[in-house]
Image (cartoon, rainbow, N blue to C red):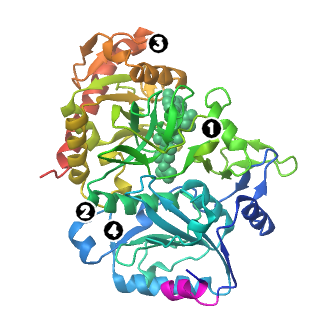
Amino acid sequence: MNKDSLFEMIQLKNVTQLYWDLSVAELYEQAIKRHEALLSASGSLVFHTGQYKGRTPKDKFIVKDQQTTEQVDWGKINQPFDPLSYKRLKSKVLSYLQDRDLFIQRCYACSNPNHRINLWILSERPIYSLFSRNLFIVEKDPEKRKYLLPDFILIHAPGFRADPETDKTQSGAFIILNFDEKMILIGGTGYAGEIKKAVFTVLNFLLPQKGVFPMHCSANFGKDPQDSAIFFGLSGTGKTTLSIDSTRYLIGDDEHGWDDSGVFNVEGGCYAKVIRISKEGEPEIYQAALRFGTILENVIINPQTREIDFNDDSLTENTRAAFPIEYIPNASGQLAGGHPKNIIMLCCDAFGVLPPVAKLNPEQALYYFLLGYTAKIAGTETGIQEPTAVFSPCFGSPFLPLPPKAYARMFKEKIEKHKPNVWLLNTGWTGGPYGIGKRIALETSRRLVRAILSGELAKADFIQEEYFHFSIPQSSPDVPTEILHPSKSWKDLSQYEKTARELQALFEQNYHTLSLT
Ligand SMILES: Nc1ncnc2c1ncn2[C@@H]1O[C@H](COP(=O)(O)OP(=O)(O)O)[C@@H](O)[C@H]1O
Ligand SMILES: C=C(OP(=O)(O)O)C(=O)O
Ligand SMILES: [Mn+2]
């Protein structure tokens, strides 16, 4: 593909210079030269995203074409965009890109060759070219890379702002997926996570068409690549942190597919939260975050010494490190593993009602998969901070174009066929709700995960919990038994019973609002 055919394909005109597949060092130079980023004392590259420091689901749209009209679960999450407005906005973005430099990375998503999707990521800024290089999979052979034709093109113009009135967007920012044209248009937002999650959303539409189950989960395996485990969970529940473990080999930290041969990573890199990260708690991520090639997003850096301060949350809690998966010492190298023997559903329960670990029967597994529960701490406003329950069906509703039942059906088929053990793991509060109890120590969650994955925990004695009816182990290696059951860890038993009943009612209410027929 040469410059002219690219221009013809996406009607791009008068770009000053096109930079194809720049290397890490070249992208560093470009980003620094343009004052987009600062070199840290340890070698990573720090950049700040401006107004947007997290995803904005209300700015995301899917263009209504024949295929999407019929198949997409339209509503609050999947918002339609009309093809004519898309055409107009796209030409505005393309005129904005005139007389600018443009950085292109040719890479792909899905490590399984049968499901590979080639991507061209075009950005006006070199830092996002480096992000794409780090997060997606890069063809090692430069000759092959040169001839990589795109299945999807992503045009990224963070400096362009839409006018909601004329452009039919919700704000100056937009993430628009066009399946007919096989294009993704992102503008007005500098949060790098939008790039990877937009591609994931595309795959959540395309993979099911081939009978592949796409999952918002992390994955790793033990000594045997067939002994794989997956960890479902909403943002902040521990997918990245708990799947990166010195006793296991990492397949991936966020997005996977499951087909007849097992699980495979969609990506080739990690996007780890680094707020208050410690060398002791998360040694693998900590060292990766400091390395040459890693991008640190919205992390604070000393303007003179160029030392990084991971404790500084003055820009956001959502500070991130983006690096290739090889930066994790025990990355598996093959980005794939067998059919999961264990499935762990993570939640961060700020009500402190769910036990640190519970075993689920297949029916309960399907119920919790559809529910997609976690609970967060409400914004830091003055006064009391009440935990708020979040329900995100299939642990990823912002990324799922199809109705939840489409993914639930695949989940059910997979667990019926491969019969994994399914567990619920609360990485949130214990001994009481937020404000009274405390967050379960990362080390405790790690021990529980190791006991699950070694097969040890399945051998424990279990008791059935009275509100939720799942099975709680009576003991687990190296974990104090009294923390395993909330009715024992809470000081105020009647308060526990009241909160448990309330949460149970919330679960039922939410489950019934899902249309599953
Ligand atoms: N018990 C725990 N289990 C897992 N993570 C914990 C725990 N306690 C605190 N954390 C912190 O919570 C965050 C979990 O985030 P992360 O692993 O990035 O979630 P995800 O990948 O699901 O978005 C990390 O910053 C981690 O240090
Ligand atoms: C990148 C994201 O995913 P996660 O927090 O699950 O790692 C995100 O939600 O923006
Ligand atoms: Mn993550």
Camera-nearest residue between 367 and 223: 223
**Where is residue 516 shown, x and y percent of the image?**
16, 50
Res 479 label? 3
Q: Residues within 10 Å of mark 4 (few under 14, many from 20)?
A: some
Q: Residues within 10 Å of mark 1 (few under 14, many from 20)?
A: many
**Where is residue 4 shown, x and y percent of the image?**
58, 88
**Where is residue 342 shown, x and y percent of the image?**
35, 30
Query: Mark 2 = which residue?
Result: 73
Camera-nearest residue between 262 and 425: 262
N-term mark: 2 or 4 = 2
Q: Is residue 309 left or right of residue 140?
A: right
N-term mark: 1 or 3 = 1
N-term mark: 2 or 3 = 2
Is the Cβ of the residue at disc 1 closer than 8 Å to that at disc 3? no
N-term mark: 3 or 4 = 4
Give the residue drawn at x 45%, y 32%.
221
Dot 4 amino acid type? Gln
Highlighted range, magenta: 3-14
N-term mark: 1 or 2 = 2
